[in-house]
Amino acid sequence: QPERKPLLAGNWKMNNNHLEAIALVQKLAFALDAADYDRAEVVVLPPFTDLRSVQTLVDGDKLSIGYGAQDLSRHEKGAYTGEVSGSMLAKLGCSYVLAGHSERREYHAEDDALVNAKVKAAFAHGITPILCVGEGLEVRKAANHVAHTADQVRKAVDGLTAEQVERLVVAYEPVWAIGTGEVATPDDAQEVCGAAVRSTLAELYDEATAAKTRVLYGGSVKPDNIAGIMDMADIDGALVGGASLKADDFAKLVRLG
Ligand code: PEP
């Protein structure tokens, strides 16, 4: 079994200005100790405008907290008003970036081809993409969630090398569980993380490659439900929205409850 260090990634979404960001990361740093960082990788994903503040704090205090962005442009540079490139994020020390979060897919019409381009843009700048996949409620009700999610994975990794897939992080986030308080059961989450995510990567590449990819669950993860989710064989961490905005809760998640 290859080592897959648990990853706890906090997606702040459109919350916290650059001063609030400093306060939250400071609180988080106070709440965590060396044993926590040994056990899990801790990453925050603030809005673009907070990244410089977070970088200054992390560098200045030599914090073991990683950080990244919630989105990036598929383009390198140029006339793309409002967009932020992978090279800009890399320059700010970002080690991760979300690609294809369901809110981007839904509110910004991001399709699988665009998500694929963003995943490649991240790798091109040495940033690890956290590829988000997952089905909506209708698909779940029709029991098509495994096929639907597997298809998203297949399209998003098109053209990646095996080395890139080993470094890739995939977050399975059933849309009906995001921000709703409705959490998938550990068995439901494991079903998709195993049968739709890891198996698809094994099919497209090989078992050894797929065994290295970290697969996260996301959707209303809280201190009282994380332990059961993290117990599952194919789940290597969590992508957390709401609970990442409170330092104490996020620290509890790092300690699995
Ligand atoms: C998310 O948006 O990635 C997420 C999982 O949100 P929440 O934890 O609030 O459901």
Image (cartoon, grey):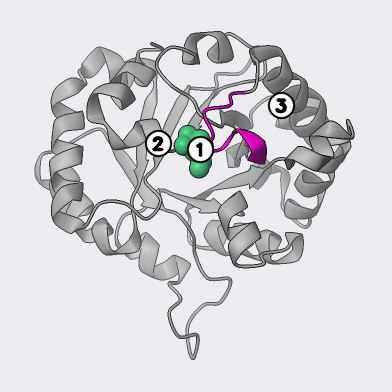
Quadrant of the rendered image containing residue 174:
top right
Pointers 3 and 2 in contact (C-beta within 8 Å)? no
Q: Which badge, 2 or 1, is on the more N-terminal residue?
A: 1
In the rendered structure, the answer to whether residue 53 lies left or right of residue 221 reads left
- As shown in the figure, which amino acid type bears the numbered disc 3? Cys
Q: Which badge, 3 or 1, is on the more N-terminal residue?
A: 1
**Residue 186: percent from left, percent from top:** 64, 14
The residue shown at (65%, 58%) is 105
Q: Is 179 within the magenta?
A: yes
Q: Where is mark 3, residue-wise?
A: 193
Pointers 2 and 1 in contact (C-beta within 8 Å)? yes
Q: Where is mark 2, residue-wise?
A: 242
- As shown in the figure, which amino acid type bears the numbered disc 2? Gly
Question: Looking at the image, can residue 131 be seen?
Answer: yes
Q: Residues within 10 Å of mark 3 (few under 14, many from 20)?
A: many
Is label 1 within 8 A of ligand 1 (CB to nearest ligand atom)?
yes
Q: Residues within 10 Å of mark 1 (few under 14, many from 20)?
A: some
- As shown in the figure, which amino acid type bears the numbered disc 1? Gly
Residue 72's place in the image compared with 190, above or below, is below
> Magenta span: helix, strand or loop, mainly?
loop
Q: CA distance from mark 3 to mark 1?
A: 20 Å
Residue 125's place in the image compared with 83, above or below, is above
Q: Where is mark 1, residue-wise?
A: 179
**Residue 154: percent from left, percent from top:** 81, 47
Q: Is 21 within the magenta?
A: no
Q: Residues within 10 Å of mark 2 (few under 14, many from 20)?
A: many
**Residue 201: percent from left, percent from top:** 78, 36
